[in-house]
């Protein structure tokens, strides 16, 4: 008889949760979930209740024996869990709005996972997730932690370096790319192979084969690409793509087309507002739909949220870990020599064989020389940011900011860091404890 599973979702009040529930229903024969715990914090309780009730209606309509529990006590949810997924946003959308708007004042890309905005998200998130890991170490030491929380690569590396939790990072971009390819060529997924090289939100595809036939050259010549609703659209230069000999992630437009992307962001800010403000409106509409007591399925409008397929990626990974299927998935895992110019503990985004004991990275066939420098530079920034998040050391944080390729000078880096740390003061106590009187420090 198969084991009945307990799954905990940290950030269960997220608008993505119905997609996760849909996956648990669809694949219940392969992933026999018995308990689904949705966890959130007090400020997110209203959303948790709305999403939780929709989850209960979806499961009731399916007739499956899955019990849904809603709680703000994460320890109860974590205790004895088999899988724990994290889809949280420390500081919520208000913090994201600052991450996106403040850099623009300095002529720097403002994005929630890339550049200074991504750095602030990492600084806010890493200590919180490591605190959750302490609970997992105590209450569910054999659980798998599947981390959706952005910046996913950086956060997953912090967990790998500073905890004993078995963790894997996830992103929707690779699964979205694979769906796009199968649609382009009208084939099933098992007939397509795409080799991903790089880091989370900084990857290139260096091989694309359909039925063993090379399709990369064709895609580059036609300038076809998988795009996303949360990244503004700019066409790639054809000569550049051919010379790159790899299909770049849409996030790489921030690095390869910085002036045009910056101008798009400035215009968007003056028009509909930051991406955070757009998401806020989409979420308000979604939660209005979720509140309908007659709704018993995931609404189509969820795809506008910008994170389509995140939850599908999570359910696929849980199924593969549980059943030891040995299929190929693109995941964020420790390097362990796969990219020879990065440290072993660096988190990279590559194809892996998923076994019951965890993902095994597949050796890469090619890493073009011209992309190695950018990978190394961004990984250096990420590792400095992880250290700054844990120590609260402003000197290390300054080095992280200065060495991000999108930050043009020391002066701008210093001003940006000062303003963004201050804007995030409620979420970054590690950077402000030195300012406290000695008697107050003793109470922290």
Image: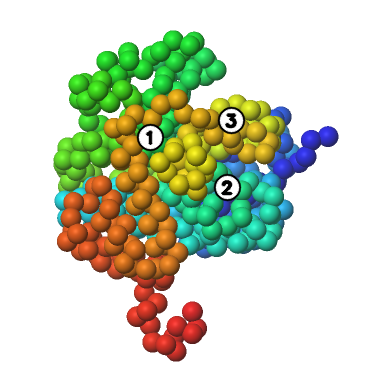
In the image shown, does 197 or 39 lie closer to the viewer? 197
Q: Which mark is residue 167?
A: 2
Q: Residue at x 41, y 70 (%)?
A: 430
* Crowd rating for badge 1 (residues with CA inside 10 Å; few <14, some 14–19, many 20+): many
First in sequence, mark 1 or 3: give its number.
1
Q: Is residue 96 left or right of residue 411?
A: right
The residue carrying mark 1 is 203
Q: Residue at x 37, y 79 (%)?
A: 434
Q: Quadrant of residue 21?
A: top right
Q: Is residue 30 left or right of residue 102?
A: right
Where residue 115 sits in the image (x, y, percent)? Answer: 29, 49
Q: Is residue 43 left or right of residue 84?
A: left
Where residue 304 sits in the image (x, y, percent)? Answer: 38, 35
The residue carrying mark 3 is 353
Q: CA distance from mark 2 to mark 3?
A: 15 Å
Q: Are marks 1 and 2 in contact (CB under 8 Å)?
A: no
């Amino acid at each position: 008889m198969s084991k009945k599973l307990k799954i905990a979702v940290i950030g269960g009040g997220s608008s993505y949760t119905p997609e996760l529930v849909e996956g648990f229903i669809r694949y219940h024969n392969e992933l026999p979930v018995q308990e689904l715990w949705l966890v959130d914090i007090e400020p997110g309780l209203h959303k948790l209740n709305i999403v939780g009730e929709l989850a209960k209606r979806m499961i009731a309509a399916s007739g499956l024996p899955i019990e849904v529990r809603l709680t703000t006590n994460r320890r109860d949810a974590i205790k004895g869990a088999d899988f724990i997924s994290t889809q949280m946003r420390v500081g919520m959308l208000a913090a994201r709005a600052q991450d996106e708007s403040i850099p623009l004042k300095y002529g720097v890309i403002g994005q929630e996972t890339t550049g200074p905005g991504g750095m602030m998200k990492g600084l806010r998130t890493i200590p919180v997730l490591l605190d959750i890991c302490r609970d997992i170490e105590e209450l569910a030491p054999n659980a798998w932690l599947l981390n959706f929380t952005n910046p996913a690569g950086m956060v997953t590396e912090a967990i790998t370096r500073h905890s004993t939790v078995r963790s894997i990072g996830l992103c929707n971009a690779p699964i979205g790319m694979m769906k796009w390819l199968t649609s382009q060529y009208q084939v099933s997924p098992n007939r397509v192979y795409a080799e991903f090289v790089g880091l989370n939100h900084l990857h290139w595809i260096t091989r694309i084969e359909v039925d063993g036939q090379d399709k990369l050259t064709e895609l580059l010549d036609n300038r076809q690409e998988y795009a996303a609703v949360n990244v503004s659209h700019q066409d790639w230069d054809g000569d550049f793509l051919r010379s790159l000999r790899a299909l770049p992630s849409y996030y790489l437009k921030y690095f390869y087309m910085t002036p045009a992307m910056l101008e798009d962001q400035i215009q968007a800010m003056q028009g509909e507002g930051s991406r955070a403000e757009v998401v806020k409106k989409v979420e308000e509409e979604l939660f209005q739909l979720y509140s309908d007591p007659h709704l018993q399925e995931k609404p189509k409008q969820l795809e506008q949220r910008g994170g389509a397929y995140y939850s599908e990626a999570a359910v696929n990974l849980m199924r593969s870990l549980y059943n030891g299927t040995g299929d190929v998935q693109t995941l964020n895992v420790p390097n362990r020599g796969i990219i020879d110019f990065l440290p072993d503990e660096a988190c990279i985004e590559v194809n892996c064989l998923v076994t019951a004991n965890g993902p095994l990275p597949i050796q890469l066939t090619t890493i073009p020389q011209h992309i190695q420098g950018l990978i190394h530079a961004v990984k250096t920034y990420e590792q400095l940011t992880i250290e700054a998040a844990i120590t609260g050391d402003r000197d290390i944080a300054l080095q992280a900011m200065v060495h991000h390729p999108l930050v043009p000078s020391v002066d701008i880096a210093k001003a940006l860091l000062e303003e963004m740390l201050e804007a995030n003061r409620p979420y970054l106590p590690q950077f402000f404890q030195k300012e406290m009187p000695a008697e107050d420090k003793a109470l922290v």
